[in-house]
Amino acid sequence: MKILVVDDERTLVKGMKFNLENEGYAVECAYDGAAAVEMARSGSFDLLVLDVMMPEVDGLEACMRIREFSNVPIIMLTAKSEDADKLMGFECGADDYLTKPFNILELKARVRALLRRAAGVQRAQGDVLTAGDLSLDTRERVAIREGKLVELTAKEYDLVELLMRNPRRVYSRENLMNVVWGYTYAGDYRTVDVHIRRLREKLEKNPAEPDHIMTKWGVGYYFKG
């Protein structure tokens, strides 16, 4: 697995590189958002660790540019702890968020969890979930709508697969955070709302009146087959 670490704090980058390489990952480094975008274009990375506050092109802008051509998993780093800043990161396409200062063990745990989910569980050939004009190829981890491939981030895919595998089962936002993100999230559960909205924009004919990804008011979300 190959990871790109991007932060203008060179000492921090050095520490992350050392610890991630000790875990067996191949690590490359960059120190500004513009370099991150260009390096990500190579398509050779399995995960990006991307700081928000950087010179020239900040992490949020870099994340949005990368999402134009890649669904590589992205963990954002920030010195800000406000929920609004985290939500902005998710809006830009981030898969996970870590607030500085952080424990390196937590970073490594989140890297492992995100890579594991991005790789997916190997399943039998032809394992496809279908509902109307929407299909998920669970072996390739791709979504298809009306015969066309739909680009999803790792977390977006994990979320819709969980819902499709359990039609009409209502999940609270807390349940979805714990199952899809893989850890207890002590933060703002509007993160789930952001991902649901993005999924509707990508997968529904009319996001305002969805046919598949439904809301159970006051409870949570479910998939209507």
Image (spheres, rainbow, N blue to C red):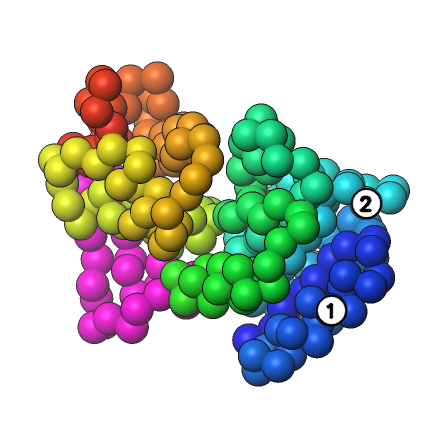
Q: Residue furthest right?
A: 56
Give residue 4's position: percent from left, percent from top: 68, 65
The residue carrying mark 1 is 15
Q: Secondary structure at mark 2?
A: loop
Q: Quadrant of residue 6?
A: bottom right
136 to 114, vertically: above or below = above
Q: Which of the two residues, 194 or 219, is positioned nearer the viewer here?
A: 219
Per the model, the C-alpha gap separating discs 1 and 2 is 18 Å
Mark whose residue sits in front, 1 or 2: 1
Residue at 68% in and 43% down: 78
67 to 168, vertically: above or below = below
Which one is earlier in the sequence, the residue at label 1 or at label 2?
A: 1
Q: Which residues are magenta?
A: 118-141
Q: Is residue 210 left or right of residue 91?
A: left
Residue at 30% in and 41% down: 176
Amino acid type at mark 2: Met
Q: Residue 54 got which mark?
A: 2
Q: Residues within 10 Å of mark 1 (few under 14, many from 20)?
A: few
Q: Is residue 31 left or right of residue 22?
A: right
Give residue 167's position: percent from left, percent from top: 13, 40
